[in-house]
Amino acid sequence: MISVDDYRDRVAALLGTAPATALPLAAAAGLVLAEDVTATVSLPPFDNSAMDGYAVRAADVTAPVTLPVADDIPAGRVDVQPLEPGTAHRIMTGAPLPPGADAVVMVEDTDGGTETVTISAPAREGAHIRRTGEDVVEGSVALHAGTVLGHAQLGLAAAVGLAEVRVHRPLRVLVASTGTELIDAPAPLRHGQIYESNSVMLAAAIRGLGCEVDVVRSVVDDVEEFRKVIEPKLAGADLLVTSGGVSAGAYEVVKDALTGQGVEFAKVAMQPGGPQGCGRWQGVPVVTLPGNPVSVLVSFEAFLRPAILTALGHTDVSRRRVRARLTEEMPSPAGRRQYRRGVFTPSDREVTGIVGPRGGPGSHLLGAFTQANCLIVLPEDVTTAAVGEEVDVLLL
């Protein structure tokens, strides 16, 4: 058997880093910058008012004082006239500061006049003025390569004058589920059949990482049919992910179809999710997962999620790991890393909190997975974890 860590490295090495492409800001949410964003303008791009009020010379304001209002400056005005000594300009938030002004008096400290204004509080030089470049300086790096583009980052890119950014291109992932027993809902089930769910889970999980996903559901256990359905779609894929057909029994269609075609199959020292395979088929990276739904989800967490995130340019690709005390005893198979669904509860009285398994170890217990908020990880050399023992927990 191969270790979990070694197999994770194999999967990650398949994908490398996605190429860079230019995308409009509206299409770049959640993606990762492939190169620095340089500001084409300063932020703010000009000295402007931080308040609705009056632009003045601080030396003219010995409160209380009444000054003539010589001009009105709304936001967006581009022909601002200089402020003459002994006068005030009414000014709105974001409007450019007139030359000669060195302070803004809040409208709340005035009578709000339009012909003349009576100011009841002294003005401090520099008060309520946003200076050019105090946030971002023109020509500086506003966003660094490797930054994940959330809403604030996209807003900053727009504010410094960009309409598009270069990002690591979303991977195009082909997801295929296999098994003659699989039926797509809502068709009626016959005895011996089950509704297909793996492709639904995988597609949702992979889309959630920022990828484009094409799905082929419920491919029957026939090698020629598998190749007939999948091969035409390989040219448009950066990655093929399959579920089912990789174990040691008969009718293992994925294993039968891809053995000798560049994909290697192995037993990974883990529970659930032992049967795995990865490699390249016709030049396309392939990751083959087991068929049981919990094995699929654990395999996604252990291998696919970190590899895909790394390929997309992310540097933080791991789930948050904490230590927690077990609320009940847990057996574990010798020589295998066990991933059990669990419920983690933070606690001020513990190192980080407490955790208990949810459902049994069976790889078919999908309902229990939906009630879990973590995976309890027991290492290969542990056969029993006692009540109160500290264990590693991956927060989902």
Image (spheres, rainbow, N blue to C red):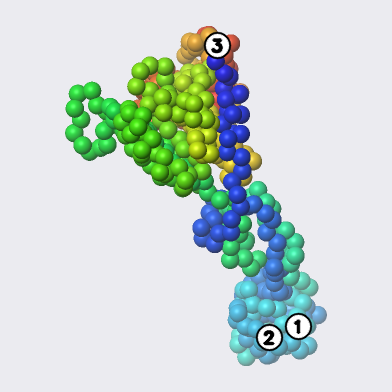
Residue 389 appears in the figure: no
| Identity of the residue furthest to the right in this view | 59
Q: Splitting the image into 4 quarters, where does residue 122 fall?
A: bottom right
Pointers 1 and 3 in contact (CB under 8 A)? Answer: no
The image position of residue 256, as x and y in percent, is 41, 24
* Distance in Å between CA atoms under marks 3 and 2: 76 Å
Choose the circle earlier in sequence order: 1 or 2.
Answer: 2
The answer to which image quadrant residue 351 occupies is top right
Separation of residues labelled 1 and 3 (CA atoms): 76 Å
Residue contact at pointers 1 and 2, CB within 8 angstroms: yes
In this rendered view, identify the residue nearer to me: 363 or 73: 363
Q: Amino acid at mark 3?
A: Gly
Residue 335: mark: 3
The three-letter code of the residue at mark 2 reads Val
Asked which secondary structure carries label 1, the reply is: loop
Q: Report the residue marked by disc 2.
A: 80
Amino acid type assigned to the residue bearing label 1 in the image: Pro
Residue closest to the eye, 352 or 371: 371
- Nearer to us of marks 3 and 2 is 3
Please identify the quadrant where the N terminus is shown.
top right
Q: Position of residue 207 (x, y in %)?
A: 46, 44
Mark 1 and mark 2: Cα distance apart in space = 8 Å
Q: Quadrant of residue 380?
A: top right
**In the displayed structure image, the side of residue 256 where residue 337 appears, left or right:** right
SS for dot 2: loop
Mark 1 or mark 3: whose residue is earlier in sequence: 1
Q: How many marks?
A: 3
Residue under numbered circle 1: 99
The location of residue 87, given as percent across then percent down, is: 73, 88
Residue at 62 percent across and 65 percent down: it is: 162
Give the class, few, some or many, for how many residues have Cα within 10 Å of label 3's Cα (few <14, many ≥20).
some
